[in-house]
Image: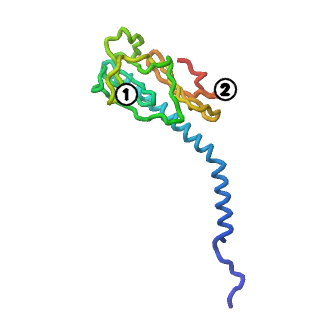
Amino acid sequence: MVNVLTKNKGFTIIEFMVVIAVLSVAMVLTLPDFSKWILSTKMKNVAESIALGVKQAKGNAIRNNWTAYFYLNEDGSWIVSKNSGKMDTVRGGMMKINNKMKISVNPSGANTIIFDHMGLIISDFKNSPNKSTVVEPSEALADYGIGPISEITISLIDDDEAINDIKIKIGEGGSVITCIDFKIDNNLPNNCKNIEM
């Protein structure tokens, strides 16, 4: 005897379409937050790359007992060089900002940090016998540049309250700290306002 009450297993096309519609609405509602998260992550990656470059310049100066140059480009890329020539490039960072981000440097226009053989920052560029380098291979070498850099800020071109600025603070002794410049005041330990160099 055949059981008439058996059910077919599976989904109907209507149930499937309802699930697709619910997922579509959920994706549309979360997409702006997801794109902000990606942009914030890219800003952190650029900051970490630059901080790594400064630390490597200091480490190379101490380890090899020579003057090391850290040079920052406007697009966020950087190089570490020995002495003053392109041929002396030791390491470079190619993590660049995108068209929604900008880099601000303190003091304004600064682009170079020079470490002596003990890893201390040389602050008097005008009296230094060496010159730093412009990192683009197609360009000629420049004079020793402006510096030393004491703070680098990665922020958005168009201000967005949901995305905080990232700062790299460089102390006179060459210490490097990356922190978040929160737009909403709070007391978190990684808040740049709580960090003194």
Residue 183 — which label? none
Q: Residue furthest bottom?
A: 1
Displayed quadrant of residue 54:
top left
Residue 160 appearing in the image: yes
Task: Give the mark nearer the N terminus: 2 vs 1.
Answer: 1
Q: Residue furthest right?
A: 5
Secondary structure at badge 2 equals: loop
Q: Residue furthest top?
A: 127
- According to the image, label 1 marks what residue? 79
Viewed as shown, does residue 62 lie left or right of 2? Answer: left
Q: Residues within 10 Å of mark 2 (few under 14, many from 20)?
A: few
**Rendered location of residue 133, percent (x, y):** 34, 22
Q: Name the residue: 60% across, 34% down.
A: 163
**Rendered location of residue 33, percent (x, y):** 62, 43
Secondary structure at badge 1 equals: strand
> In this picture, is 1 found above or below 25?
below
Q: Name the residue: 33% across, 27% down.
A: 139
| Quarter of the picture holding the N terminus | bottom right
Q: Name the residue: 58% across, 43% down.
A: 35
Q: Residues within 10 Å of mark 1 (few under 14, many from 20)?
A: many
Q: Which amino acid type is marked by label 1? A: Ile
Q: Which amino acid type is marked by label 2? A: Asp
**Rendered location of residue 160, percent (x, y):** 62, 33
Q: Nearer the viewer, residue 37 or 66?
A: 37
- According to the image, label 2 marks what residue? 185
